[in-house]
Amino acid sequence: MFKKLKNKKGFTLIEIIVVIVILAVLMAVAVPSVMSYMNEGKNAKYQTVARAVLIDAQTQYAKAVADGKKSDEATSAIESYVTAKKYTGLDAKGDVKITKITLAGSGNDAAEKDIQVIECTIKLDGNEKNVKIDANKKVTVSDKTNG
């Protein structure tokens, strides 16, 4: 009877524990990396939409200047255009709301100024985030604060 037990092949308890410890260490390293890649992917969606908003805003500002509008009228035209547009990847029109447009340049004439920074809120997949994009297309994404 004892001879049969000694001839049995299989893993010992120590071997199984070592394998479990190795897997736990690998998971401890891999999970945070995967989570950060997922967050970067989500933020990339916001950045893509923000860059499209900047291009549309610059285009609308140039059209308004060509039509002889003042800076206030031009920024108002930008806000209404962006709010009315449905951007690729978003669910509906109005998912982008501009909160602030900063113009750069000297003089009172709208033609002497250009868009420097746009701040907006973007609603994507049920989440709403604050997004800030400058004329160099540097995008900053932050969680929306209710305040």
Image (tube, grey):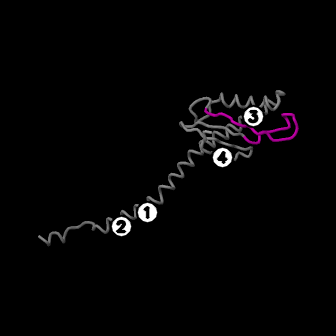
Left or right: where 64 falls relative to 88 = right
Question: Do the residues bearing badges 3 and 2 touch, measured as CB atoms within 8 Å?
Answer: no
Mark 2 or mark 3, which is nearer the start of the sequence?
2
Q: Residues within 10 Å of mark 2 (few under 14, many from 20)?
A: few
Name the quadrant of the N terminus.
Answer: bottom left
- The numbered dot on residue 25 is 1
Mark 3 or mark 1, which is nearer the start of the sequence?
1
Residue topped by disc 3: 59
Q: Position of residue 98 (x, y in %)?
A: 68, 35
Q: Residue at x 27, y 68 (%)?
A: 12
Residue topped by disc 4: 140
Asked which secondary structure carries label 4, the reply is strand
Q: Which residues are magenta?
A: 95-117
Give the dominant element type of the magenta stretch: helix, strand or loop.
Answer: strand
Q: Position of residue 118 (x, y in %)?
A: 71, 39
Which residue occupies the extreme left position in the image?
1
Question: Do the residues bearing badges 1 and 4 touch, measured as CB atoms within 8 Å?
Answer: no
Left or right: where 133 falls relative to 72 = left
Q: Is residue 107 magenta?
A: yes
Q: Residue at x 65, y 29 (%)?
A: 85
Mark 3 belongs to which amino acid?
Thr
Mark 2 to mark 4 CA distance (whole Å): 44 Å
Residue topped by disc 2: 18
